[in-house]
Image: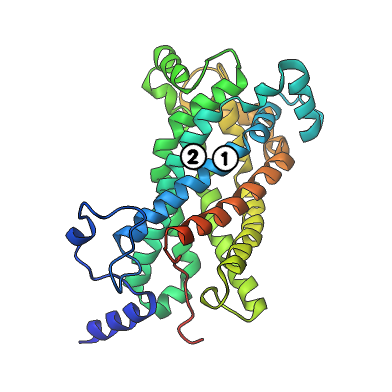
Amino acid sequence: EIHSVRKSSLSSTIHISSTPFFKMNQPKSVLLAPSPAGAKYDFMYYLKGAAAGGICCSITHGALTPVDVVKTRVQLDPVKYNQGLIGGFRQIIAEEGAMALTTGLGATAFGYFIQGWFKFGGVEVVKINMAEYLGPEKAWENKTGIYLLAAAAAEFVADIFLCPLEAVRIRSVSDPEFCDGLADGFVKMAKQEGLMGFYAGLPPILCKQIPYTMAKFAVQGAAADAIYNGMGSSPDQVSKGTGIGVSLASGVIAGVASAVISHPADTLLSKVNKAGAGGDGPMMTRLANIANEIGFWKLCTVGLIPRCVMIGTLTAGQFGIFDTVMNTLGASKFHFTNPHA
C-alpha cells in the first residue's frame, strides 16, 4: 500500500507512462507522433530525446570543425602553430587553403550524431528512471548525483561508437594526405592498424568525455536552476523561447567548466592518434610517455583558450538545439522539481 501511494505521488509529478510497450511500438508510431494520452515520459519520449541529441551534437560539432582543426593542430605541433586561434586560422589557410579547415567534417558530423543519440537519449532514460525509483523528494535532493551517474553511463556507451570515427578524424587532421574522406579513412586505418587501431584512443577518450559529460550535465542543470531561481520562476512557468534562452546561458557556463576539466585528456587523445606518438608498447605506456614529454602544465594549458571558445559555444548550442527539436517534436523536456515548492 505504501508503494502504491509513492508511485501515485510520483506519477502525478513526472507522469511516468503506464502504456504497454507493445502499443507504443505499433507500425503507425513515428518520431512526430504524439505520446499516448496521459503518457509524458514513455518510449516515444526517449526516442525523440535520442533523435534531438543526435541532431544537436551533429550540427554543433560539424559547424565548429574549423575551430577543432586549429585546436588539434596546436595540440599536435605547438612549435609551428604558436600564433593563437586567429593566427592558426590564417596560417592554415595560407599554407593549405580554406578547405583544409573542413578536414574531418564527415567523420565529425556522423560520429557525433551517433554519440549524441546515445548520450542525450541515455541521460534522459537513466535520470527519469532513477527519479521514478527514488521518488520526487529523494530525486530532488540527489539530482546532482543523478545527473553525474546518468551522464557517465550514457557517455560510456556513446564513446564505444564514437571512438573509431574520432580516430579517423584526428588522423586526417594531423595528416591531410592520409585519406580522401570518411570511408577511405576507415579502409586505410583497418588495413594499416587493424581493429585495435580504431580504439587506440579509447582510454583517453573515456578519460576526456566521461568527466566532460558529467560536468556538462551537472553544471548545466545547476546553472539553469540558479537562473530560474533568480527569475523567481520554473521551467514550466516560462515561454518556450525563455526556456531556450536559459538553456543557452547555462550551456555556456557548463561548456567552459567541462572544457577545463577534460582538457588534459583531450590533449593526450590528439597526440596518441598521431602516427608514432609515445613510441611502442602498451597504450598506457604510450600515454605516460606522451604526458612526460609534454609536461603537466602544457598538458593542461596548450590549446585551452580555443577549446574553451569551442566547447562553450558548442555546449550552449547543443542544449539550445536540443530543447528546440524537442519542442518541435512535441516533447516536453524532463526537469527535476522541488516537491516542497
Q: Is residue 203 visible?
A: no
Task: Determine whether, in the image, residue 50 is placed left or right of residue 307.
Answer: left
Q: Is residue 121 above or below residue 230?
A: above
- Residue type at tag 1: His
256 or 113, nearer to the observer: 113
Indicate the secondary structure of the residue bearing disc 2: helix
Q: Is residue 110 visible?
A: yes
- Looking at the rendered image, the quarter that the N terminus falls into is bottom left
Task: Say which residue appears at 23% left-offset and 60% top-offset.
Answer: 24
Q: Quadrant of residue 149?
A: bottom left
Residue 251 appears at what percent x and percent y?
61, 57
| Residue 262 in the image: above or below residue 84 | below
Residue carrying label 2: 112
* Closest to the observer, 277 or 257: 257
Label for residue 61?
1
Q: Residues within 10 Å of mark 2 (few under 14, many from 20)?
A: many
Which residue is at a point 63% across and 81% down the rendered structure image? 232
- Left/right placement of residue 61 relative to residue 339 reads right
